[in-house]
Amino acid sequence: MNAPSTTVTATPGIMLIRVGQAGCSLRWDAARQCWRWPDPVGSQLYAWPAPPAMPSGSRMLESACVMASCSSGRLLVGQGKRLGMLTLPQPGQPSRPLQAQVLITIDAAEPRTRISDGCADRDGNFVFGTANAAQDQRPIGSFYQYSQRHGLRRLALPAVAGATSIAFSPDGRRMYFADAARGAILHCDYDAERAKVSGTKTFSELLAPGAGAAVVDSAGQLWSVQGGVLVQYDASGHALRQIALAREAVASVCFGGAGLDQLLMLGAQGGLYGLPPDLAKGQAAGLADTLFIDCGSASSSELRA
């Protein structure tokens, strides 16, 4: 367990686009070579750069807060208490609201919870968590693994008020996670095939209240959003630096680009930012998002988006 202190580097960032009313989950779509993110307030799904002959935003019938690219080319989305499958429009198709095909309802008997964070693990399963959306903020949220092969399996992790910071080590054997209401990032051993976890430990105390999105790069370093600031940790849990946007709080972070060497930050008010050269210099490349397996079977190399 580490509780380091670092100074915050404030940057205006390189603003690439500002759209919508809010930002949450940022993902790189390698097949279409663009970043995607949902606006949970405006019920929009945005893309930058927009694919040829396509608008930058598409209206959704129901807002989403998490998503993952799929092996079929569709998007897996978390909408309230449900996981659903979204088919993206093709160039030239008439513009119409996007409606997800419901796959499963999570914890249907508990009206207070909703899906709060999630990503595909290195084996193509979707790992996600729930949060208590009620004012009492009791720890009634859980972590799950979902796959078409095994269905829904609850992970034996502590109950939380708000599941967040879900990410995986480069080899997929370590899972990172946090409770948004508590003050630490945790990690555990993770067995994707059996949906088993063990050896939960504290990775690092938070430098700012409010754990958020997290991602791991190719060097095993964790990039964590905390209280609207981006914190970079080495693989042992030591904080290396903090980066704050001058215009708005950081809401999510993602690596992308042809060489996965671009780190973009999504602002809480819908701005998309790149790091200026002085801050991006020397950083490790990211890891390709693993595709959620939603059709047939695929090799591990085919799953790397």
Image (cartoon, rainbow, N blue to C red):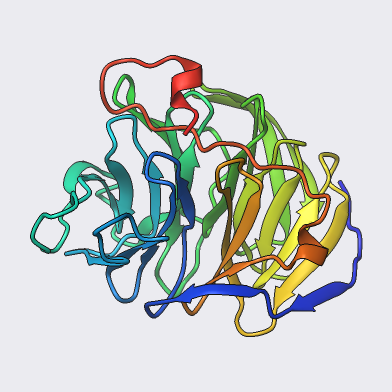
Q: Residue at x 40, y 70 (%)?
A: 134
Q: Residue at x 40, y 77 (%)?
A: 19
In the image, residue 132 above or below residue 199:
below
Left or right of 126? Residue 89 is: left
Observer-nearest of 34 and 161: 34
Observer-nearest of 224 and 111: 224
User: Could you say where residue 95 lies in the image, as x and y percent from the top left?
Assistant: 12, 64
User: Could you say where residue 46 lies in the image, as x and y percent from the top left?
Assistant: 35, 64
Left or right of 127? Residue 278 is: right
Q: Residue furthest front?
A: 52
Q: Residue furthest bottom?
A: 247
In the rendered image, which quarter is residue 206 located in?
Answer: bottom right
In the image, residue 298 above or below residue 277:
above
User: Could you say where residue 197 lies in the image, as x and y percent from the top left?
Assistant: 60, 27
Q: Is residue 261 visible?
A: yes
Left or right of 262? Residue 34 is: left
Left or right of 137? Residue 183 is: right
User: Could you say where residue 138 lies in the image, as x and y percent from the top left?
Assistant: 50, 63
Q: Residue at x 26, y 23 (%)?
A: 295
In the rendered image, which quarter is residue 64 located in?
Answer: bottom left
In the image, residue 113 above or below residue 249:
above
Q: Is residue 193 visible?
A: no
- Marks counted in the figure total 0
